[in-house]
């Protein structure tokens, strides 16, 4: 390999040059605290509001509905805990989510259960799709919030968000979506899709790490503060704002949405080439929906192969990939997402997630297509169980 091939864009993305250049002045000469009233402080405040407007425009929201956070995980925590605690006095103590959510949602729900809230974890089908009718059947008079991810971070399946949003609006229940994997890659309009709260993170679409945002629809009940302290973010989240990071987030989203159809078409074509060729190998299955999936996501399971060994051998060839969420990469347990779609433990352990972005090239895809079959063949040759599995 002449250079590293980065195929783990679902974990994080490279900061684009345009975003970096937009950020640099706010890391050097324009260093004022945006809460200060003198000149360089007012410059920082103006930059924050420009970025807020950029994010709002990208989501079909109003600038006053955008609140900056440190990451998507914080935005998820804020959305679920904020709504749950705000509506508890009204007897709303029930939350609906799915079994394949990111751990930022699942662990937050577990924490709320310890506070006395009840949570329904809806199953998904073999493709990772949640049923809108299942959501409807799970609703009760005590339901405070439905939270369904826009697109799954591991298998790439895009959920029926507009339909779930319409159901929740009709039933008078608030609807949150963890859109960390979707923002910047799919068209999103929070008004048309009846989304009340939405979480996003800049580093998933060529922005910096350490900055995210939460959209909160105007007029919904929400606690006055999330972090106690100063009056930043209109009194709802204390702490001096990360001006450079926020500027980067705004610019990254603006750049990501420019020529989105052309970018989507190009990345999808590379993804489809990976899927078409790698699924020709014996005992390989595609995980996730065959077409209703993120443009760059290719998640495959290879029977008779252990995922960690597959990743290490690919890394030795300078190919960066993953076997699931980067947030759980140290876990020895199989992916909860793959188990939820019905994979046996031994098959779930042999998963490979290749996630492409608009900085990848067709030539890189061809190099991946050369490397993966060779690595899989090598591992299967060493496997004590492959001979008994391959003829089943």
Image (tube, helix red, strand yellow):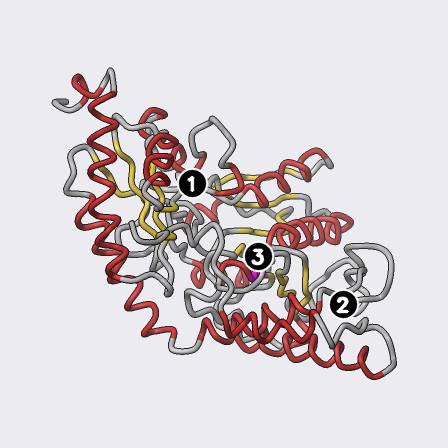
Overall secondary structure of the magenta stretch?
strand
> In 3D space, how far apart are the residues under numbered discs 3 and 2 (Cα atoms)?
20 Å
Q: Earlier in the sequence, mark 2 or mark 1?
A: 2
**Residue 253 has which mark?**
none
| For residue 371, side relative to residue 101 (left or right) | left
Label 2–label 1 contact, CB within 8 A: no
Which residue matches tag 1? Answer: 324
Can you say whether 333 is above or below 138 in the image? above
Q: Residue furthest bottom?
A: 39
The front one of 58 and 275 is 275
Which residue matches tag 2? Answer: 233
The front one of 135 and 148 is 148
The front one of 313 and 157 is 313
> In 3D space, how far apart are the residues under numbered discs 2 and 1 (Cα atoms)?
34 Å
Quadrant location of the C terminus in the rendered image: top left
Q: Give residue 329's position: percent from left, percent from top.
A: 49, 36
Q: Residues within 10 Å of mark 1 (few under 14, many from 20)?
A: many
Label 2: element kind: loop
Which residue matches tag 3? Answer: 176
Q: Earlier in the sequence, mark 3 or mark 2?
A: 3
> At x 23% / y 56%, what residue is drawn?
272
Label 1: element kind: loop
Q: Which residues are magenta?
A: 198-202
């Amino acid at each position: 390999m002449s250079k590293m091939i980065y195929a783990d864009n679902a974990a994080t993305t490279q900061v684009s040059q345009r975003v970096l250049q937009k950020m640099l002045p706010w890391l050097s000469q324009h260093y004022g605290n945006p809460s200060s009233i003198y000149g360089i402080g007012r410059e920082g405040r103006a930059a924050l509001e420009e970025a807020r407007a950029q994010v709002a425009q990208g989501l079909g929201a109003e600038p006053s509905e955008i609140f900056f956070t440190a990451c998507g995980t914080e935005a998820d925590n804020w959305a679920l805990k904020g709504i749950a605690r705000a509506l508890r006095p009204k007897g709303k103590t029930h939350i609906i989510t799915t079994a394949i959510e990111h751990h930022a949602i699942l662990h937050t729900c577990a924490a709320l259960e310890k506070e006395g809230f009840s949570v329904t974890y809806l199953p998904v089908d073999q493709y990772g799709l949640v049923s809108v009718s299942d959501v409807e059947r799970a609703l009760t008079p005590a339901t405070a919030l439905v939270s369904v991810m826009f697109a799954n971070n591991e298998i790439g399946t895009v959920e029926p968000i507009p339909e779930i949003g319409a159901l929740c609006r009709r039933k008078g229940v608030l609807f949150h979506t963890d859109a960390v994997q979707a923002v910047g890659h799919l068209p999103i309009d929070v008004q048309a899709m009846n989304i009340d709260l939405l979480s996003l993170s800049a580093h998933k679409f060529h922005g910096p790490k350490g900055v995210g945002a939460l959209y909160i629809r105007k007029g919904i009940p929400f606690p006055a503060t999330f972090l106690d302290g100063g009056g930043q973010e209109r009194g709802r989240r204390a702490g001096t704002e990360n001006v450079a990071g926020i500027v980067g987030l705004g610019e990254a989203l603006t750049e990501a949405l420019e020529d989105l159809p052309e970018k989507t078409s190009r990345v999808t074509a590379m993804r489809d080439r990976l899927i078409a060729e790698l699924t020709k190998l014996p005992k390989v299955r595609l995980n996730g929906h065959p077409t209703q999936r993120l443009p760059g996501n290719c998640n495959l399971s290879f029977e008779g192969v252990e995922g960690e060994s597959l990743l290490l051998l690919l890394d030795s060839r300078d190919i960066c990939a993953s076997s699931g969420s980067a947030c759980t990469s140290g876990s020895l347990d199989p992916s909860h997402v793959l188990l939820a779609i019905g994979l046996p433990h031994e098959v779930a352990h042999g998963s490979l997630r290749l996630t492409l972005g608009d900085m990848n090239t067709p030539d890189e895809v061809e190099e991946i297509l050369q490397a993966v079959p060779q690595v899989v063949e090598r591992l299967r040759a060493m496997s004590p169980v492959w001979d008994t599995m391959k003829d089943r």
